[in-house]
Amino acid sequence: MPGGLCLVKKDIRILVVDDFSTMRRIIKNLLRDLGFTNVEEADDGKTALPILKQGRIEFLITDWNMPGMTGIDLLKTVRADPELSHIPVLMVTAEAKREQIIAAAQAGVNGYVIKPFTAVVLKEKIEKIFERIT
Amino acid sequence: MSLDVDQEILEDFLVEAGEILELLSEQLVELEQRPEDRDLLNAIFRGFHTVKGGAGFLQLDAMVDCCHKAENLFDLLRNGELSVSANLMDVVLQALDSVNLMFEQVRSGQEPEPAPADLMQRLVVITEGGAEADEPEAATAPAPAPEPVAESSKPNPNTPNDEFDQLLGDLVSDNKETLASSEAGQRADDDLITEDEFDALLDELHGAGKGPGALDHPEKSAQVSSDEITDDEFEALLDDLQSKGQGAFAALGSADTAAKPEATKLESVAPPAKVAPTEPPKAVEPPVVSKSPTAEPSARGTMPAQQKAVQESNVRVDTALLDKIMNMVGELVLVRNRLVRLGGTREDEEMSKALGTLDMVTADLQTSVMKTRMQPVKKVFGRFPRLIRDLSRSLKKEIRLELRGEDTDLDKNLVEALADPLIHLVRNSVDHGIEAPDVREKNGKPREGSVLLSAEQEGDHILLIIRDDGAGMDPEKLRRLAVERGMLDTESAARLTDQECFNLIFHAGFSTKTEISDVSGRGVGMDVVKTKITQLNGTLAIDSILGQGTQIAIQVPLTLAIMPTLMVTLESQAFALPLVNVNEIYNIDLTKTNIVDGQQVIIVRDQALPLFHLKRWMVKGCEHEPLPDQGHVVIVSVGTTRVGFVVDQLVGQEEVVIKPLGSILHGTQGLSGATITGDGRIALIIDIPNLLKRYAS
């Protein structure tokens, strides 16, 4: 994996979306371990959108299963919005169900990560996404 | 419990997942009423799902396993492939119980024990029974722990592996096939995608590499071996999606190249049916389209990087800290009282203005701090639907529970302290109160009994009511029993009012049921309930009509830290009587007392009340102090007992902050604590029920 995290700026602004605040905290901590400290949170797709619309978020990590607006709907909305469609999206899911992942890929996801994961795994996922888009 | 998780996160998890579990317990009972409710089923599914997700990170495998199975079951339920039955609910509730049990284990620092194997087996059987086999987990489930196993026995789905990429063709067609084949109940993880597959998929979706026509054939067989997508596959997919790794997200770095035409191929990939490379862009769902070059700078420009979007509006605070703050506010209140008293004696306008403000601010502060400790009584009430459900099933009674005023707030300590007494009283209502459906019918009542649990705030206290429409209590029977048990002689039993008879059930060793049921125990309960409520400075009133039902009313103060009292003096010593017990104050002629049964009594509104000279009990050297001719009498009540206390002086009503007694006085019967009065003196707070127990019985 050439390049590695050096491709990714540490101050990149990340939005973590999950309805379970413990999970947000876990992800935030993992990101912090990787050096990403510029992290915001939202508890579902509906609350995430206004934050995204402010135009500062550069990377979106979202859970799949949420009340209100699910991760996949959020993804679709993001991709459909010309202002937001550039934002890379990492989907957090509970299992690697083929059907789901394909649906996510088709909706424009950049990567997925299966719970539970470690900082190392998260790092790889992020690296891979940025490797691809730079 | 290690991973990348620290203790703090574990604590967070315990709190947050704990709330979800509480909610689940309510929702499950609700589900029995509305088994078809899609939203409810979804919510329950999500509840288990969320707990599982969190537990996964904390490596609580046993919990993950149990939640996972429950989640699978609810996945079928919410998709209508299974329907709710009482049997199913029993199993699910038991599963929830085991998760709760594990929760307690984790909380106390132990590794959670796996749920009983037979329970897990039953969950699996039910899930399988309903699964039309297109649910992959149904097949996996018999394995002891599908989730952890999945992780240890095969490469972690998150670990990149080098399965070959470019499997998109199978992927898309295989997707369809997988569904079909797994319908035959074939392999467990058929529906799982691997990283490589995903990569390949993304490549294909975004990419120019292959025409959609090429999609279906290649390497279908290779695919069968593993249906988990691998990193490489995923890469390949991405490549295809994004012109071989170039472009779609140029916005974040390089120039944008991922052209619309490529993107539109997404559409053609999506359905398994091959479509010729469709060029006319379908606007339905603009896929990973890159951002226009101009958008980037503008986005940058618009972010002066301030203004936190959604700020966390909640902070978790250790209750010990709240207790400490409460205590300090208490001290402040005492100083305030003292200052206000001192200021009142001086004619200084400036000073009294400042004091007025201090008074107000302190009061506000006190209320706010108290509010931080408030919790809705729902915390306790939430357990009852489940309790009633289980009891009705085990006792074969039909019971409807009504909850009112669940949002009423009261002090956290009180919420916790009230849980056990309330549970006991409700059990009692169900066990002894509500009759069997047939009996009810015979008596012209609806088969379904009703239990009402309500909470409301009344001034500075909370009123809790537990009411059932059951058989009610027979005062005659209670009198007889009291005599049989040697608690009273026949004569005094006969003198008891009906009210007093009902109160007999709160005496130790009094159980109206001759047989011991495993539901409401053996008569130790009710007196424990009474003691507990009394400890909370609360009162308990019971009323019953034979054949119509019983009502128990509990009054507790809003908070335990501050108590309104009536300040009195005895030989120039200050004493505080809890206002909750005080009924009225009299100044009466004490020469007109009578002696009944060797007890001095005074007649107040045609009622004879025992009269006690408080000084004889509380002040050293006054044991035989004669009664004055004229005196202040404070009428207090404890349960149904009303007595009069003769005191020297009435000082007035004062809110006091309760301080525990020092070690020497600690445990003195009749005293519940001490406080500092407005004039700077120490006042002992009298515990009236125990005082009477100690001296007057």
Image (cartoon, rainbow, N blue to C red):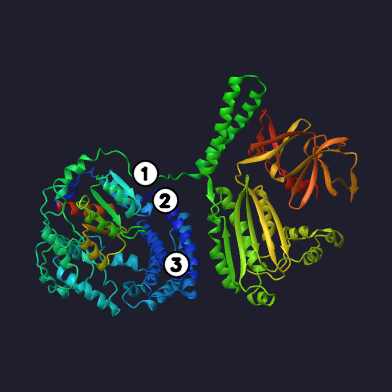
Q: Is residue A22 left or right of residue A90?
A: right
Q: Amino acid at mark 2?
A: Asp
The chain letter for the residue carrying disc 2 is B
Which image quarter: residue B145? bottom left
Badge 3 element: loop
Residue ID for mark 3: B115
Badge 2 element: helix
Residue ID for mark 2: B12
Q: Are the residues under badges 3 and 2 in a single subunit? A: yes
Front tag of 1 and 2: 1
Q: Residues within 10 Å of mark 3 (few under 14, many from 20)?
A: many
Whether residues under marks 3 and 2 lie with C-beta atoms below 8 angstroms apart, the answer is no
Residue ID for mark 1: B311
| Residue occupying image coordinates x 63% and y 27% | B340
Q: Amino acid at mark 1?
A: Gln
Q: Residue B200, percent across and down?
A: 16, 64
Please determine whether, in this image, residue A29 is positioned above or below residue B161.
Answer: above
Seen from the viewer's position, the closer of residues B671 and B649 is B649
Whether residues under marks 3 and 1 lie with C-beta atoms below 8 angstroms apart, the answer is no
Q: Residue B28, percent across and down?
A: 47, 66
The chain letter for the residue carrying disc 3 is B
The chain letter for the residue carrying disc 1 is B
| Residue occupying image coordinates x 29% and y 73% | B188
Image quarter (top left, top right, bottom left or bottom right) of the N terminus of chain B? bottom left
Q: Amino acid at mark 3?
A: Ala
Q: Residues within 10 Å of mark 1 (few under 14, many from 20)?
A: few
Q: CA distance from mark 1 to mark 2?
A: 18 Å
Badge 1 element: loop
Q: Earlier in the sequence, mark 3 or mark 1?
A: 3
Q: Earlier in the sequence, mark 1 or mark 2?
A: 2
